Structures are given as structure tokens and as C-alpha cells.
Image (tube, rainbow, N blue to C red):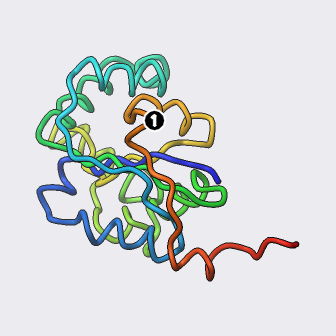
Amino acid sequence: MEKTLIVLKPDAIKRGLIGEVLSRFEKVGLKVVGMKMLRPTKDHYHYHYETIGKVISRRGKDVFDVTLDFMMEGPVVAVVLEGIEAAELVRKMVGATEPKSALPGTIRGDYTHISYAYANNVSKSSIANIIHASGDAEEAKLEVAHWFKEDELFDYATNAEAHTLPKKKK
């Protein structure tokens, strides 16, 4: 089974969307194998966004600084989800990074609407888009290891797995 990371950002926490967002992942058969609320340090975010995500390298220091300021506004909830091709499925469910472009039915499409133009030119802030999701399976491995120790991840069976996973041939 593949593991992937999501981080419910400060805007999701402040809006009281933790349970609603998590339930969407559980309803499709993904399993929560690790979860914690925390207030990461700037160093933790630097490793996450630059060492792993290459935000400064790809998008510039200004984007990184605005993102860091936004993420430092409050606690976040980090969650490890497990399932078949979990990283790809989660990205599909989360929707486009820019909420304005996220389709209805996705998490960002249903709970946010801000555009890059508004964030950049009017509010001069980061784009409040509820959730971070690992970009792909390789990034997920690095992010899970950065946010969680091995003993913070759990292996257990759920009743839903009998109905959401393919049957194993004997």
C-alpha cells in the first residue's frame, strides 16, 4: 500500500473543516495511518517547501516567504493516508492548487475560490487553499518521513477495506 501526506493548513483549521475534509478521504477507502496537530518551525517548513518541494528554486523566494508566513499563522494537522495509488488519488480529490481553477467536487473547488491574481495583487498574501498534498509517490515518501517518525504510523485493518480493496487471489 502506498502512503501519502496531506497537511490541513491554518485556514482549514480556523474554518473548522478538519473532520469534513478527512471524511472525504475515508469515504473513498483511504486509511488514516498517522495524524497529529502541530505548529512546525520555520526550519521544518523550509525543509518541506524547499529541500523537498523546491519552491524557492521553482517559484522564487517571494513565493516561499509568503507561503511560510501563511503557514506560520496557526497550527496545522498533518495526516498520512494509505491506499492504492494514494498520492495520485489524493491529488485528484484535492484539485488544482489555485482554488479559482479547482473543479467543483474537489476539496479546493468546494471550499475555496481565491485566485492567484487576487492573492498577488490585492491581498498581497499567500493563496488560502485549505490543504497541502504530496505531488507524487516519490515526494510522498520524503514528506511522510519528514513529518512522521516510524512509530507514529500505524498498521491496522478497517472494515471498509473488505469493500474498497480488490480481493486477493488464493
Specify the quadrant of the image occupied by residue 64.
top left
Q: Is residue 15 left or right of residue 53?
A: left
Residue 117 as seen in the image, left or right of residue 139: left
Disc 1 marks which residue?
Answer: 150
Residue at 18 percent of width and 47 percent of height: 10
Q: Is residue 69 visible?
A: yes
Toward the viewer: 107 or 148? Answer: 148
**Farthest bottom residue?**
163
130 vs 164: above or below: above
Looking at numbered disc 1 in the image, what kind of residue is underneath it? Answer: Glu
- Residue 127: % across, % down: 27, 45
> Circle 1: is it few (<14), some (14-19), or many (20+) Cα within 10 Å?
few
Tell me the residue at 45%/59% (across/down).
94
Residue 51 position in % (x across, y down): 45, 18
Quadrant in which the C terminus is drawn? bottom right
Place of residue 4 in the rendered image (x, y in percent of width and height, measured from the top left): 51, 47
Q: How many marks?
A: 1
* Vertical arrangement, residue 146 with respect to residue 135, above or below: above
Q: Residue at x 32, y 46 (%)?
A: 78
> Looking at this rendering, what residue extends furthest in the right direction?
170
In the rendered image, the quadrant that contains the N terminus is bottom right
Q: Is residue 76 above or below residue 130?
A: above
Q: Say which of 112 and 16 sits in front.
A: 16
- Residue shown at 40% from the left, 49% from the top: 6
Q: Mark 1: which secondary structure? A: helix
Do we see residue 118 in this rendering?
no
Which of the 4 image quadrants contains residue 72? top left
